[in-house]
C-alpha cells in the first residue's frame, strides 16, 4: 500500500484525480500482478538460463575488467555472444560508472541486444577474491552475473527479475 500511496502522490502533483479510490484499486491490481508474475517467472528464468555449463566458481580476476571478461567468456564459449559484447559492457561501465553493481557484492553486467548477442543467455561466476568496481557499497564484488538478451523486452524482464531476486535475498 505504501507504493500505491507514493504513486498517488506523484499523480496528484501532476494530474487531476477524478476518483482516488478507483485509482488506488487499479494501482494495487497492477502492482499485485507484477508480484504474481515475478513469483511465477523467477524460477523458470533461473532454471532456463543458468544451467551448470553457464556457472563458474572461484574464478581469478585481478580487476573489474577481467571479472567482466570472465563472465562474458562463459557466454562466448557457449556460442551465445560475440566478443563485441564484452567491449559494449566495458564501454557502458566506463561511461556510466558502476551502475551495474545492483547489490552489495553483485554485478549484473549487460549491454544492448545489438551489441553481439546471439541468443538469450546468462552466466554466473563467483570470484576467488573480491574486485573493486568503485561502487557506493564500498565492498568488493564477488558475484558477476552476465545477461545477454536478444531484444529489449526480454532484456528488461530478466533484469527486473534478477534485481528483485538480489534485493529479496539480501545478498
Image: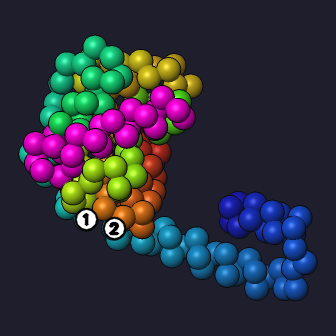
Question: In x, y percent, where is residue 11?
Answer: 81, 69
Neighbour tally class for label 1: few under 14, some 14-19, many 20 plus, Cα within 10 Å: few
> Does residue 55 appear in this view?
no
Residue range corresponding to the magenta coloring: 74-96
Write down the quadrant of residue 23 in the picture: bottom right
Write down the quadrant of residue 56 in the picture: top left
Residue behind mark 2: 41
Rendered view: 128 above or below 20: above
Question: In x, y percent, where is residue 76?
Answer: 16, 43
Q: Left or right of 41: which side holds 93?
A: right
Question: In x, y percent, where is residue 146?
Answer: 30, 43
Give the SS element for disc 1: helix
Front one among 51 and 1: 51
Residue behind mark 1: 44
Q: Going 50% across and 70% down the picture, which residue do you hit?
A: 34
Image quadrant occupied by the C terminus: top left
**Magenta stretch: includes residue 76:** yes
Amino acid at each position: 500500500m505504501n507504493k500505491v500511496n507514493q504513486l498517488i502522490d506523484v499523480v496528484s502533483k501532476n494530474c487531476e484525480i477524478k476518483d482516488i479510490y478507483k485509482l488506488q484499486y487499479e494501482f494495487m491490481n497492477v502492482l499485485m500482478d507484477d508480484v504474481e508474475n515475478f513469483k511465477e517467472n523467477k524460477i523458470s528464468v533461473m532454471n532456463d538460463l543458468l544451467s551448470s555449463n553457464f556457472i563458474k566458481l572461484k574464478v581469478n580476476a585481478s580487476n573489474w575488467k577481467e571479472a567482466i571478461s570472465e563472465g562474458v567468456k562463459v557466454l562466448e564459449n557457449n556460442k551465445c555472444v560475440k566478443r563485441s559484447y564484452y567491449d559494449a559492457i566495458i564501454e557502458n561501465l566506463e561511461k556510466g560508472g558502476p551502475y551495474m553493481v545492483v547489490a552489495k557484492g553483485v554485478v549484473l553486467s549487460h549491454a544492448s541486444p545489438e551489441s553481439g548477442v546471439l541468443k538469450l543467455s546468462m552466466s554466473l561466476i563467483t570470484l576467488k577474491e573480491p574486485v573493486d568496481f568503485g561502487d557506493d557499497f564500498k565492498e568488493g564484488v564477488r558475484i558477476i552475473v552476465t545477461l545477454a538478451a536478444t531484444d529489449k523486452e526480454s532484456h528488461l524482464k530478466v533484469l527486473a527479475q534478477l534485481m528483485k531476486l538480489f534485493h529479496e535475498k539480501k545478498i
